[in-house]
């Protein structure tokens, strides 16, 4: 079998993989604006608004609401335009490491292909190809949550920029989101303990319909809503890899770890780690003797970023944190801290 040679092979074409690919290749779309968020207690009529413009040293007043499929395509197309060789609908069958290189066998349309590369970035998302191969993927037992969600048209929104805000509604044992994706389409979902859903013995569709109908803040907004997608379920999404690097590999994005969707950290951490991985490998390709130090620095930086979100996620599920979060006082400096 013919073996194709590369400096770096990247497993996965999501935000982490596309970012790393575009940056490495360069060296050698009208999304809806998002101006902040609003949080409610389960039965509260008055929410607490957080605007990005109020953040410490804010340099922008908005972010963007994106549908992941469209966003991922923008990034992947950009990586290809930057010079990266992109292979879609391709599965990784085997990864073998030696002292000097990495051999991968990939399969597409029923045929196999051999790749040899100096280094590999695993950005394969929750599949975490190398994390599973090395058995380093560890779950957070106290965060075994499950999310059920769908997309809807016709959901009521406030006027002006308040209509772009992500709404989070905190209940006793669950929380809900309402995320405007486009001028018409809205993502609505629920996150709760996996065991609670299993005990209900309901289908995901019936459980979601019942939960949304029973939540007054959401039910009021869905009077004229129509479901425009299937009902999606995501489970077992809180985990971390015990190691993020080896002699010839790095884990990036969700392959490195995923904490919880509450603070929408997934895409940020994916792009952040993809950029750091590209920077590290760009230097290592020229100065291989620095690999150990640079890869260790990469792991520390990504772990520090995930630790920040883990602290907030752990706090989100405590009563004390929510009491402060839903009634922030300017004297505490909470609004600008959250928005930052």
Image (tube, rainbow, N blue to C red):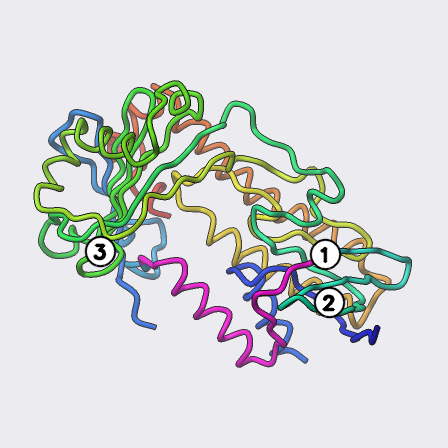
Q: Which residues are magenta?
A: 65-93
In the image, residue 90 sits, relative to residue 241, either above or below, namely: below
Mark 2 surroundings: few (<14), some (14-19) or many (≥20) residues within 10 A? some
* Residue named by callout 1: 93
Label 3 element class: strand
Give the numbered dot on residue 164.
Answer: none
Q: Residue lying furthest front in this view?
A: 110
Residue 234 percent across, percent down from the top left: 44, 40
Label 2 element class: strand
Whole-Å distance between the Cαs marked 1 and 2?
9 Å
Asked if the residue at tag 2 contacts the one at tag 1, i.e. Cβ–Cβ closer than 8 Å, the answer is yes
Residue 60 percent across, percent down from the top left: 32, 61
Q: Nearer the viewer, residue 210 or 334?
A: 210
In the image, residue 10 sits, relative to residue 273, either above or below, namely: below
Residue appearing at x 47%, y 53% in the figure: 268
Residue appearing at x 39%, y 18% in the figure: 199
Label 1 element class: strand
Residue appearing at x 37%, y 48% in the figure: 340
Of the image marks 1 and 3, the number of the one nearer the N terminus = 1
Question: Closer to us: mark 1 or mark 3?
Answer: 1
Of the image marks 2 and 3, the number of the one nearer the N terminus = 2
Residue 76 percent across, percent down from the top left: 51, 70
Question: Is residue 314 left or right of 155 when viewed as pictured?
Answer: right
């Amino acid at each position: 079998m013919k073996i194709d040679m590369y400096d770096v092979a990247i497993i996965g074409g999501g935000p982490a993989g596309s970012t790393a690919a575009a940056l490495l290749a360069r060296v050698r779309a009208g999304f809806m604006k998002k101006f902040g968020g609003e949080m409610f207690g389960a039965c509260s009529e008055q929410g607490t608004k957080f605007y990005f413009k109020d953040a410490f040293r804010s340099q922008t007043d908005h972010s963007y609401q994106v549908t992941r499929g469209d966003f991922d395509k923008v990034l992947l197309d950009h990586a290809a335009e930057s010079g990266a060789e992109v292979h879609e609908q391709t599965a990784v069958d085997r990864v073998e490491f030696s002292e000097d290189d990495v051999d991968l066998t990939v399969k597409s349309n029923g045929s196999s292909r051999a790749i040899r590369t100096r280094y590999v970035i695993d950005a394969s998302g929750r599949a975490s190809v190398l994390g599973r191969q090395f058995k380093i993927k560890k779950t957070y037992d106290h965060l075994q949550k499950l999310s059920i969600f769908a997309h809807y048209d016709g959901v009521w929104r406030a006027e002006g920029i308040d209509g772009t805000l992500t709404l989070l509604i905190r209940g006793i044992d669950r929380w809900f989101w309402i995320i405007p994706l486009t001028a018409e389409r809205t993502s609505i979902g629920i996150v709760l303990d996996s065991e609670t859903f299993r005990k209900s013995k309901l289908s995901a569709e019936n459980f979601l319909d019942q939960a949304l109908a029973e939540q007054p803040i959401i039910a009021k907004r869905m009077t004229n809503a129509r479901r425009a997608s299937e009902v999606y379920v995501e489970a077992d999404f809180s985990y971390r890899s015990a190691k993020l690097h080896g002699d010839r590999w790095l884990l990036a994005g969700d392959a490195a770890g995923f904490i919880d969707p509450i603070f929408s950290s997934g895409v940020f951490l994916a792009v952040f780690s993809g950029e750091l991985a590209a920077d590290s490998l760009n230097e290592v390709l020229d100065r291989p003797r620095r690999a150990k130090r640079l890869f260790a620095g990469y792991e520390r930086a990504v772990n520090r970023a995930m630790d920040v979100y883990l602290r907030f996620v752990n706090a989100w599920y405590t009563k004390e944190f929510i009491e402060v979060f839903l009634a922030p006082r300017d004297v505490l400096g909470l609004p600008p801290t959250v928005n930052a």
